Structures are given as structure tokens and as C-alpha cells.
Image (cartoon, rainbow, N blue to C red):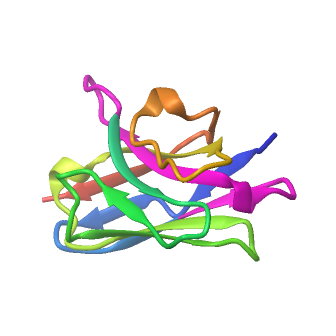
Amino acid sequence: QVQLVESGGGLVQAGGSLRLSCAASGRTFSSYVMGWFRQAPGKEREFVAAISKGGTRTYYGDSVKGRFTVSRDNTKNAVFLQMNSLKPEDTAVYSCAGVFRGGWEVPVTADAYDYWGQGTQVTVSS
């Protein structure tokens, strides 16, 4: 079982940057595919990014490609989301998620993930 705690959210002006962190408990973090999702008020949860167990493969939602970068440090049980060129439409609660995978699959849908953090608010002002 994995417990996830996000940090790094806040208020930033459009065009600015934020770096989110997600700290994971447990000794088998390197066996978990990790993802980032976001949900804005009145909207459905949206896929942001995902990263393979070893960190060599990354996937992004269309709305964040070229602006966001997901990474992980398995020695520190942590996953990160670097967000650049932020836009007001990026405003949402961002959550990290994890799922144990024995193979090569990297899910990009929320229903595939078993463990979730509590979320961190990101607000981008215009």
C-alpha cells in the first residue's frame, strides 16, 4: 500500500511556473506507475501526466504538452510535476496517483489508479 502527499501548489501569475511534489510512503515505490490528474470546479477530472516505473517513459495530456514535465526520484520515493508557462485555465486541484504494475503499461485514465493523494490547489491569475 502507498500513501501519497502532494505539496507545492499555490497562486501564480499567468506565464509563471510551479513545481509540484508528491511524496510516497512504502518500500516498493519503484514498482508503481505514477500519474498526475487535475480537477477544476464544475469540470471532470483530467489526465495531466504519467510516468513509468523507471522514469524512462512519460505521457502528457494534450492541454499541457510542451509546458509540463513529469519526473520521479525512486531513491527519494517522490514524483514531481514541473509546470511552466501557466495559464488561467490550468487552475485546478492537482492530485498525484499511483498504481502497482508488474508490466510495461502506463495508464492514462483515472480509474486505473488505486492510490491518491489529497490534492493541492494551483491557482493561476490572469
- In the rendered view, would you say 44 is above or below 93? above
Q: Name, please, the residue furthest toward the front.
A: 103
Residue 21 x %, y %: 57, 65
Give the residue displayed 23% in from the left and 70% down from the top. 67
Q: Name, please, the residue furthest toward the right.
A: 27
Residue 104 x %, y %: 54, 53
Give the residue displayed 30% in from the left and 66% down from the top. 12
Q: Is residue 80 left or right of residue 22?
A: left
Residue 57 x %, y %: 44, 67
Q: Is residue 27 left or right of residue 47?
A: right
Q: Is residue 90 left or right of residue 29?
A: left
Q: Quadrant of residue 69?
A: bottom left
- In the image, which residues are magenta? 21-45
Q: Name, please, the residue furthest toward the left.
A: 126
In this rendering, the count of numbered labels is 0
Q: Quadrant of residue 77?
A: bottom right
Examine the structure image and report whether residue 28 is included in the region drawn in magenta.
yes
Q: Quadrant of the C terminus?
A: bottom left
Examine the structure image and report whether residue 30 is included in the region drawn in magenta.
yes
- In the rendered view, would you say 1 is above or below 56? above
Nearest the camera: 120 or 104?
104
- In the rendered view, would you say 27 is above or below 82? above
Nearest the camera: 104 or 18?
104
Q: Quadrant of residue 6?
A: bottom right
Q: Quadrant of the N terminus?
A: top right
